[in-house]
Image (cartoon, helix red, strand yellow):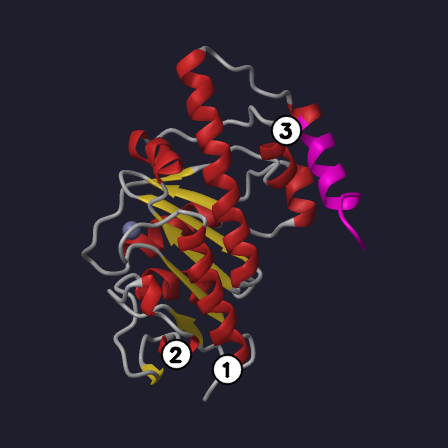
């Protein structure tokens, strides 16, 4: 079987979506790219999370042709592929409709940096891509790329990340991007947690945004000092 390690990682991260309550029923999906072959491993379409296994993940090429797998890949596969084709630095993509982050997406509202944990992980506002239609099939991927490719990002963020890690899609949901599926999953969990706290705060009053000089300090500490080396 091809790409056993990546199959296992993509399977595990799909299960993490379920365990972290970011998805219901069969919604949501995680994919990962193998940088050698450029094959993409993705969740099959419409299979319950409890019935998934590494063997049921589908391997496709960047054109969407099935390379290995008995099941049909996620209906969102092309949205992932459009991004992988253009962004050679992305190795993992997560898509959810996790409710708190999607509430901001629904209103077309970016999430400003109110929280220090937001400054730690992302160091910049969480942006919203325009509404994208299901047809033509490439539209979702194109809308994501319009935001992913943006150059006007804070200097401290550009030092550590070459692409925007989280994009809300208007009226739809959340896409997160990482070097691998594990990193993209971490961002999907974090953005939902941040959106949830912001949602509660916004119902209680008007939170203050962190000033840029404080955002950069939290971001740099987290990216340069935090954790075990
Ligand atoms: Zn969706």
Residue 53 lies in what quarter of the image?
A: bottom left
Q: CA distance from mark 2 to mark 3?
A: 39 Å
Rendered position, 91 above or below 123: below
N-term mark: 2 or 3:
2
Q: Is residue 222 magenta?
A: yes
Q: Is residue 87 magenta?
A: no
Q: What range is drawn magenta here? A: 215-229
* Left or right of 37 in this view: 47: left
Tell which residue pokes out farthest to the left in this image.
135
Rendered position, 157 above or below 85: above
What residue is shown at x 31% (from left), y 39% (from top)? 170
Relative image position of residue 17 (x, y in whole percent): 42, 54
Under circle 3, the secondary element is helix
Q: Residues within 10 Å of mark 3 (few under 14, many from 20)?
A: some
Is the Cβ of the residue at disc 1 closer than 8 Å to that at disc 2? yes
Residue 200 lies in what quarter of the image?
A: top left
What residue is shown at x 63% (from left), y 50% (from top)? 161
Tag 1 residue:
3
């Amino acid at each position: 079987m091809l790409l056993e390690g990546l199959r296992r990682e993509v399977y595990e991260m799909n299960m993490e979506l379920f365990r972290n309550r970011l998805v219901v029923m069969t919604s949501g999906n995680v994919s990962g790219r193998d940088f050698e072959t450029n094959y993409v491993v993705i969740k099959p379409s419409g299979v319950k999370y409890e019935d998934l296994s590494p063997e049921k993940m589908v391997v496709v090429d960047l054109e969407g042709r099935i390379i290995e797998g008995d099941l049909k890949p996620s209906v969102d596969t092309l949205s992932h592929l459009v991004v992988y084709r253009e962004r050679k630095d992305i190795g993992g993509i997560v898509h959810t409709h996790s409710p708190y982050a999607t509430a901001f997406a629904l209103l077309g509202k970016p999430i400003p940096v109110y929280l220090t944990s937001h400054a730690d992980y992302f160091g910049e506002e969480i942006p919203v891509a325009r509404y994208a239609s299901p047809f033509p099939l490439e539209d979702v991927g194109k809308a994501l790329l319009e935001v992913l490719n943006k150059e006007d990002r804070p200097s401290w963020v550009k030092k550590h990340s070459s692409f925007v890690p989280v994009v809300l899609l208007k009226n739809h949901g959340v896409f997160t991007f990482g070097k691998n599926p594990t990193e993209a999953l971490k961002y999907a969990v974090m953005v939902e947690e941040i959106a949830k706290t912001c949602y509660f705060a916004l119902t209680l009053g008007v939170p203050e945004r962190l000033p840029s000089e404080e955002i950069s300090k939290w971001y740099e500490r987290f990216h340069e000092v935090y954790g075990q080396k």
